[in-house]
């Protein structure tokens, strides 16, 4: 999930009006990493679901009024940023850790942190390993070209711990190598890790260590040079957090829209204020997000609660977390 690349914006890629392109096409082109439980999966009927999928649906609902008007474009850690840079997709809404080099060297803009995670490790229970320092001298599998690979090196170097590393093209191959006993531990972001371990035939034979060795603030990405599109994606994600703060849900948003006297909620839902016009959208853009996708808590619980994951840092600020919505005024 935590992707890394040091590419630069290809020469000749001109700044575009992404909103106009999406409206003319009638479809949002959204980059997704496939086979990532909790984030991006496909059910038996071929329907996509997951936290990242709902990120795509959030933007589509805001822009097109239809959360399902999406063309999903599968990408991997080696193609994610270049696909967005080249205009192959309109947004990459999931799995990119916000780092200094990415923010300053890729020609891409981040659109606000929507998930706070960290890097963890899975080991076999029979190994007796209970903390990361117990992995001194271990062989560790990791996806190549990711922040996880760099975090691993930084952590062990700082503690003068020895280890052997085996890298793979993606998370799935790395996990399969661990399961095939090619390494003593596998490391990746903890949300992604939990989703994969719980889906194993014998999850009880493995344990995710309690130690987290990094900060992984996830944010969506868009191309630089298109500030209106960046604002749209930022405020679309922000609206889910705001909806939870307001107490708006998929089941009550219609009633609240018709009855609330709260001025900020009325502006948020497009009843007054004309805020949608400021983004080039219909005034009911945020209403469409809540009605079709849900608030932040609903989206989190839908995809991560079945994996046994708690909100933690992703709780609202008033509940001790870091999620706080920018005001609608």
Image: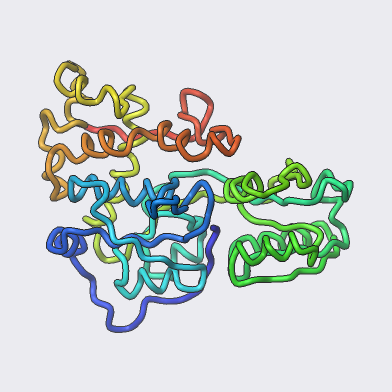
Give the x, y percent position of residue 219.
43, 52
Residue 143 image position (x, y, % from top left): 63, 66
In this view, the residue in front, 155 or 58, is: 58
Along the line of sight, the residue nearer the viewer: 173 or 275 = 173
Task: Give the residue displayed 32% in from the left and 26% down from the top.
Answer: 249
Q: Give the residue furthest to the bottom.
A: 11
Task: Indicate the position of residue 114 as horizontal and vertical percent values.
Answer: 43, 44
Q: Quadrant of the C terminus?
A: top left
| Residue 130, placed above or below residue 103 | above
Q: Using residue 190 as the reference point, say whether residue 293 is left or right of it.
A: left
In the shown orientation, is residue 178 left or right of residue 29? Answer: right
> Which residue occupies the foreground of this view, 68 or 142?
68
Q: Quadrant of residue 141?
A: bottom right
Residue at image point 49% right, 35% down: 322
* Residue at x 29% of width, y 72% of height: 87
Q: Position of residue 287 (x, y in %)?
A: 21, 34
Is residue 238 placed above or below 59 in the rendered structure? above
Extreme-front residue of the structure: 44
Q: Residue at x 71, y 60 (%)?
A: 152
Between residues 183 and 164, which one lies in front from this camera angle?
183
């Amino acid at each position: 999930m935590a992707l890394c690349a040091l590419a630069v914006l290809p020469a000749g890629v001109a700044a575009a009006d992404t909103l106009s392109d999406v409206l003319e096409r009638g479809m949002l082109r959204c980059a997704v990493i496939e086979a990532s439980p909790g984030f991006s999966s496909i059910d038996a009927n071929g329907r996509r679901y997951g936290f990242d999928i709902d990120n795509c649906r959030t933007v589509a609902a805001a822009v097109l009024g239809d959360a399902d008007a999406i063309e999903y474009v599968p990408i991997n850690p080696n193609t994610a940023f270049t696909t967005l840079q080249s205009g192959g997709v309109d947004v990459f809404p999931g799995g990119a850790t916000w780092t200094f080099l990415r923010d300053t060297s890729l020609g891409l803009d981040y659109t606000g942190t929507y998930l706070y995670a960290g890097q963890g490790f899975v080991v076999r229970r029979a190994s007796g390993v209970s903390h990361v320092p117990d992995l001194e001298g271990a062989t560790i599998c990791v996806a190549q070209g990711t922040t996880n690979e760099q975090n691993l090196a930084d952590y062990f170097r700082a503690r003068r711990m020895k280890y052997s590393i085996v890298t793979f093209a993606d998370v799935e191959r790395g996990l399969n190598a661990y399961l095939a006993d090619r390494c003593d531990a596998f490391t990746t972001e903890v949300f992604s890790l939990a989703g994969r371990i719980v889906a194993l035939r014998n999850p009880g034979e493995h344990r995710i260590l309690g130690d987290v060795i990094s900060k992984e603030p996830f944010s969506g990405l868009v191309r630089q040079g298109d500030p209106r599109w960046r604002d749209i994606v930022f405020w679309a994600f922000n609206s889910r957090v705001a909806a939870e703060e307001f107490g708006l849900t998929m089941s009550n948003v219609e009633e609240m829209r018709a009855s609330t006297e709260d001025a900020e909620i009325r502006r948020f839902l497009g009843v007054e204020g004309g805020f949608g016009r400021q983004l080039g959208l219909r005034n009911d853009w945020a209403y469409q997000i809540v009605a079709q996708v849900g608030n932040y808590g609903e989206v989190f619980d839908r995809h991560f609660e079945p994996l046994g994951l708690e909100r933690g840092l992703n709780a609202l600020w008033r509940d001790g977390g870091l999620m706080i919505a920018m005001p609608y005024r």
